Amino acid sequence: MDFEEFEVDIEQAIENFEPSKSCTVTETLNWIDSCWYAPASRNARWMDLLGDYAGAEPFVIDGHSLLQVVLDDRLLALAKEDDPSFQIIHAIYSLESILKNFQNRSANFDIVFFDANRHLVLRAGESKFTVASRALARRLLYKHLRSLDSVNTFTFAGLSDKNWLDYRVRVKPMFVMVNDGGVLKEGVGGQFAAHQILVQRLFIFSLLASGLAMVPLQGADFKDTKILSFVFESKLRLNNRGHFPKSVLSVGVAARDVLASHEQGPFDQVRSWVLGEASAPLASFDLCAVLKDIGLSYLLTFKGDTEPTLLAVFIIHVLLLKGVSVQDRARRLAPMKPDLLNSLMKSFLPRIFRATEAVIVANDVSLDIDIRVFLCVLRYLAEHPAQSLTDILGPTVAKDVEDIFSELKLPHLEFSCLSVYFLPDDLYEMPIPLKLLPFSNPVFDEELSAVHIVTEGITLPDPIEPVSSDGEESDEWDDSSTSDDSADALPSARPSQNKITKEDTLFSDTRHWHNHKMAILPKHLGGDATAPMTEWQRNRKLRSDQRFMKTLHDQASTLTGASGAILEQIKIPTAASLANQRNVKPKVVHGRSSSKITGKLSKADVIREQNIAKKESKQASESAAWIASRVQEMENLDGTGLEKCLQVLSRNPRTREASVGAELRVYRMHRLLREWIYSANPDSPASRDKYSLLLMRLIKEVWEIGFSTKEMASAITSVLITLGFSDYVDSLVVSGSADDKALSFRFVKLVKSKTKTAVYDFMRVQEHPIVWQLRLFGEFMDRSMDSQADARVTFKPDAWQREVLDAVDQNMSLLVVAPTSAGKTFISYYAMEKILRETDDGILVYIAPTKALVAQVAAEIYARFSKELNGRSCWAIHTRDFRVHDSQNCQILVTVPDILAIMLLSPPLAKMWTPRLKYVILDEIHTIGQQEGGAVWEQILLLSPCPVIGLSATVGAPEKFNEWLESVQKAGGFQHKFVHYPHRYSHLRKFYYNIHEKPRGTFQSLSTYKTTERMRFLHPLSILSSSARSLPSDLALEAVDALNLYRALSTCTALPPSTLVALDPVVFFSSGKLLQQKDVIRYEEALKQHLAPLLSSFDSQDSETPLSRVTTQLQDDVLSRVPDRALNSQPDRVVSGRNLIHLVADLHAQGDLPGIFFSFDRSDCEHMAQILDDELETLEDKWRENSPEWKRKMAQYDAYLQGAKERERKVARVSKHKADEEDKRADTSEWQASFRPDDPLPDFSFAGQGTSYTASELDEDIAYLVRRNPSPPDWALKCLRRGIAVHHSGMSKGYRSLVESLFRRGFLRVIFATGTLALGINAPTKTSIFCGDSPFLTALMYRQCAGRAGRRGYDTLGKVVFYALPMSRVQRLVLSKLPSLSASFPVTSTLVVRLFNLLDGSNYSPIAVAAVQRLFRLPQVSFGSEEGRHQLLHHLRFSIDYLRRARLLDEQGKPLNLFGIAAHLYYTEPSNLALVALLRSGVFHQICAQPSLRLAKRDFILLMAHLFGRRYLPSACMKEEYIMEVVKKSPSMVVLPPLSETARDVLVEQEHEILQIFTGYALTYGTQHQKDLGPDHILPLSKRDISGTAEDEPSLIRDHLHCTAIRVVARSLFVANSGHDDHFNSVHDLAQTARRGLSLNEHTIPSFEGITGRTKQEGRKYALNAYLLDFYIHGQVAALAAANAIRRGEVWFLLQDFDLTLMTVRGVLEQLLQKRSVDERGATSESGDLSEEGDSGYASLNPVQWEDEEEEASGKQEREKWEFTDDSQRPPGVSGVDWRVFQVVNGALEEFHEKFKAMWA
């Protein structure tokens, strides 16, 4: 379903503005962009294509787009203006490098060439040289692609090509990566640029309309193991596919024809000769023959206007190339006069390229061409006329040349005349590398030994000059400053000295980042005492704690265990008290020896046993009497009344007694049999199935109780005989007990006394009992897997669970991969209980991926455990938003990954807290593979000094991930165990909601509603697609699925007869014993084993293949009649919304609620909830208006209200006369007393009716939410009353907690949710419904969400429903395989300096040293990859040099100066380092020194938006016309104004320094380790060696080429082929073009290029979104959605992140100012405190607010007392300009924060 606010309605756009029929190509393009492409671009999402979107699914790379990316590379010397070069070997290298990037990330792709899509490669309309060069390069690159074994390449005419359509059906690609053509720019791209872009836009529109998603290839970012780009979702609709007007399409056709004529004309001119007169196609490749054909083609096609001399040199250079290495081909363009350049580019080269293209196409061959070598040969021949060709070329080449010249009849060639056209070579300056600074550190030296570099003593350069502001001289922000005008000079480097110069200040990380007066460590660990709180603060904290604990208690009371029972708290004694008990000496008892020794019971024991026996006898008698009376009561009940009575009795504690429970179930059998006998159609198959199933379930339950009497055994035996299960009597009937007693009722007679035959033949099942079990009994089979009682837990654990328990008992590390509902939740709590019992000091940390899960786990810990720790807490919560209890002073810490990573990197904690860690539990550990945050999970695994427990249900290729995790744990000295259990406890049954069929009637009310029967069952094998070559390992078959599959295989004779006999269930299973789930799993595996060969030859388009016939047999009859086009179309959103009420009502009617309706757009969730609520409210209002029953009831209620005073008088009289209690109760028990006429009626509400939760309790909870800040919207509160809710991270925490609790209590039964409920939240649901498609609905997310259904202890079967999804998408989801967990690069430059801080601040504690060693020796990116390991070490050594030059580290690795700023904003790198540079330079002072405070604050926000709010707009949104159109209608400016030139200059200078540092490192390493790096003449993918053939023959030209080639150290030789040396233009340039073996990771280098790049400069694909500056100016959320294209669901989070960042910056500035003031005064002063109330000190935290409005107001007054912005309040020693900076920052923050608060208040 799609209710996107950004969705483009093309029909509406056409209706509003249709182009004229006579519009030009440019006008048509502008119309398409403004009406469709630019708005559609806003809807595109930036995603990790593999990790978050496609996973292992296939996709297509458009071949021509791929070639365009290669040929448009600015470094490639090919088809460039004023450069005649044609460096095809560089192009091939670039092509292979791109494909290698895809393959390294395990992408599943094919390359597809569409002939209709070639125009952007050929660029018709540009110069003849450009077009001819690109045309020839296209042919050569295509030929090279076809030669690659590791890449599949296909060619189709266009999107309507039948072969393409067949390919789509067969492969089912998920999306196509294609270029969009870019933006039309004046004077760029030639005369047909608009034509090319228009044709490309139409191609993309057709692609999307055909149902395929589109991803721009140009601009895709390869980061770590991820591929990032925008995803344009397909909007294929059934009723409205969308189309452009005919006038637009006709212009598109005309543009395509114009391009085709200009592209093909010159080629056809040459090709006609080649096809008509050239020699026959070559049987084998003969280079001389090919060159002869090229020469003839050139000479005869362009008769009278040829240049034989140049042709001769062209032939010579081609013959030479096969023997020339790529090293000798690295050369600059030979300088020449314009005459020669013009002759080459305008005449000779275009013609020879066309001739070459025609010949290689006709002969299907390839050719190597290098025009720079050609020019070198030409010059050499011209300048050495006296030397013979044999001497110059060598005998072999000279002979071939002469033979070809003779065949071509070339005239005598004079080369010397061309010498005058060449100019002297330019002087070349070899790059002088920046030498690395000396560095020595005992820990890091060892890690860097593999990339050790010799350094020399070097003096650090001067820092950047501060930028002066008007007025006072500005200071630099530096902790080391001691006066207002202190210089910030860098110290000279002196090896092996520990002395720190006066200019540098060592950084001591012992204080809180937000409040410098507070120590990180609490008092009990050696920190400062906590400052006493005021009475107001104490009261506020008390109220906050009380409210939180009440909320936590309420949440905990709704949590249940795996069995469905409410959790009971365990009180755990302290370990110290247990130790004291063990140490107490046992008392010595004097007297006679115990009689037990002699084997005789003492009198006391005898009496005790007699009392027990009496008590048991009495209890048995009472129970017998109780069950007899209950049976007597039930005899008068039937139908619904009997069912309700049995349900009530089942909750009575007496039924837990074996005798009572067994007899109650036998009585239930008795009543069922009577009901069956007297039913209307007792012998119908439906009746037989219904009653036989109910009876067998009861028999199984009695057998599980294990109690029976003779009468019970006789009754059960008679039932089994009657049903036809005589063989099962021995295994299912429990022998009667010794003290037998009669049943309290007479069991129905089923067996004749004399003949022992059944009285009722119709009761006998009509199939073999095994077949019956498979068909009906599957969900009730015993699901245990070798379960056994275990004293350690309260349930019977399976074998794999006992393995886990043993591992935890042995303190082993664990990775547990088991599906949802398998039973892995207990692991965490068992480990917690173990730690709590064994120690009073040890700590267990539980890591949850989301804050919602943190709160729930904390509530469950509160519900499970209690332990008195003398003032310390048993547990604590610590997240970015809130904290509960002291995270350093608890035993169980529940937190998120970022917080634990910060704590593990804290030096004070490394000494006092980290050593106490006993276990770290990482729930949902598969999150390590996600784009955002994955690196932090890896850091935790590497830094943790204790064993870890990783839990997940969805890890792709878990064996591979476990191999790495095991290596990490073993390196830490911990044993490791991997437990992989693949089976769910409850099966998932899948259904497709047939929205294409009209409902049978309209929805009127729930009580009158009849199901539409549109929910159609999907057999797992019925949705096989032709692309499936194997089944996913987690594709499970229920018992009935396995039976139906066997029947289909048998009916279709898809397997040999002998195999079918062996698979016959009656043969496969042994009879006489009920089947268990493990038996069915064994049968399923046997079936799948025989399916494997059928899958290899499966083609869903061929209905005659065996598996096609089987899938057809398994398909639902109704769905099979729906046309494929309808089934595979995205339903119209209006239709989807209209049918929503039918979907939910169908689920209600079938008993399939509660349900979670998953949609991955927050706006969609909200919209669907409102649609449902509005529909119910409208129908309810209509019913109330027309219902006589309701009018009568309201009249009675009105009369009741009018009699209120009379009732009060009556009550008073009654109480005065002391009337009896019954009369009083009768008076107050009228229905009107509790009647609430405004409440939703049960017929129009999905709220649970049988729960203990009352309407008045809901009123209280809603009132509490309304008082909270932020309050949920009114519509959300209104929905709650009808049992409907929304759950996504944009809703307030209090609302979400209430929703989770009410869902568990059964009051809420319909939740519309994003993925927030998919990650482990305890929200047991009967059904998971997927509402509509989304790029975020991945294989991983599908499994997470589907796993919510059928939770253990609640349902024996879960259901999954697909609503408003194309069937092709359903197939992909069900059959998709989980992607393996990708690795993230775990080290950044900021992390490096934090590691040094950890070592130095902890005095090199063993824990800190071991953590650093693991981090660099065992990261996942280097596991089994030498390239990854070297990437990491190169980055480390570069970072050290960079940090030294940035004066954040000294020579021994001690943190200096502004380390605190960089570390505090670690998660924003490189923006944090850019901020450091700008603070140093004085840019902040210049901005803030403006006379206008308003402008100063605006410019400050602009600067911060460039650093910390970088969100891109796609290229189509950058068009001036579109921007102007948007800005006209909105207060937003949309495109962020450029960075100020001053700030940009500072960052450009810093970027240049970064590039110098990295280049210097690369050159130094390359020089010192040249042998280790290996050869650089092998192509990356094909592994083709371009080292040249070794020839013994002397050749002057080869010697000349060798002597004059460029020599490179760091640059790839293939890139040097285009004339590039070791001078690099950017960090991107260096990382992307580094030589083989020098592995550099661009994304980990703190480059400022992204910040300083100008939006409109060449090659920049995206503009920056001005959403933060816009919001600061106008504060309108609606404008951010409409103009800035920020999804409403994301607005709050984006603004909150920026708000927190501003708070962080203000806090840092406060600390710096305070330090300067303290330094000035020489001692700490209590006055002028700038610090706000401190929080954790580990990150930018926002304490949770539980206050009501009154408290919020009080809090604001309290804060205002401590905010100093008045100049008179300036602390001593702080300069005026520094104080002005603080005023501007504080003022801007306050303005932004007020607007932000107004948004969510």
Image (tube, rainbow, N blue to C red):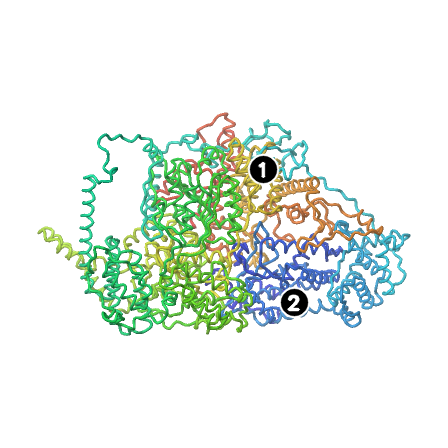
Instruction: Please report contact status of discs 1 and 2: CB closer than 8 Å, yes or no.
Output: no
Task: Residue 115: give its label.
Answer: 2
Rendered image: mark on residue 1303: none
Is 398 rendered above or below residue 681? above
Furthest residue in direction front, as rendered: 598
| Quarter of the image where the N terminus is located | bottom left
Location of residue 1438 in the rendering, given as x and y in whole percent from the top left corner: 62, 40
Residue 400 at what x, y percent from top left?
84, 60
Helix, strand or loop at mark 1 = loop
Vertical relation: 11 (above or below) 98: below
* 1 vs 2, front mark: 2
Q: Is residue 283 left or right of residue 563?
A: right
Frontmost residue, 143 versus 41: 143
Q: Is residue 794 found left or right of 1610 in the rendered image?
A: left
- Residue 595 to residue 1349: above or below: above
Under mark 2, the amino acid is Asp
How far apart, in angstroms, are the residues tagged by discs 1 and 2?
A: 56 Å
Query: Image check: 774 left or right of 26?
Result: left
**Callout 2: SS:** helix
Q: Is residue 1518 left or right of residue 1191?
A: right
Which quadrant of the structure image shows residue 1556? top right
Is residue 1231 in sight in this rendering? yes
Most extreme residue toward the right is 386
Query: Percent position (x, y) of residue 1386?
Result: 55, 44
Q: In the rendered image, is residue 1490 in sight?
A: no
Front-lying residue, 556 or 577: 577
Binning the other alpha carbons within 10 Å of mark 1 as few (below 14), some (14 to 19) or many (20 upward) gives many
Mark 1, residue position: 1482
Label 2 Cα crowd, 10 Å radius (few <14 / some 14-19 / many 20+): some
Mark 1 / mark 2, whichever is N-terminal: 2
Quadrant for residue 695, please give it. bottom left
* Residue type marked 1: Gly
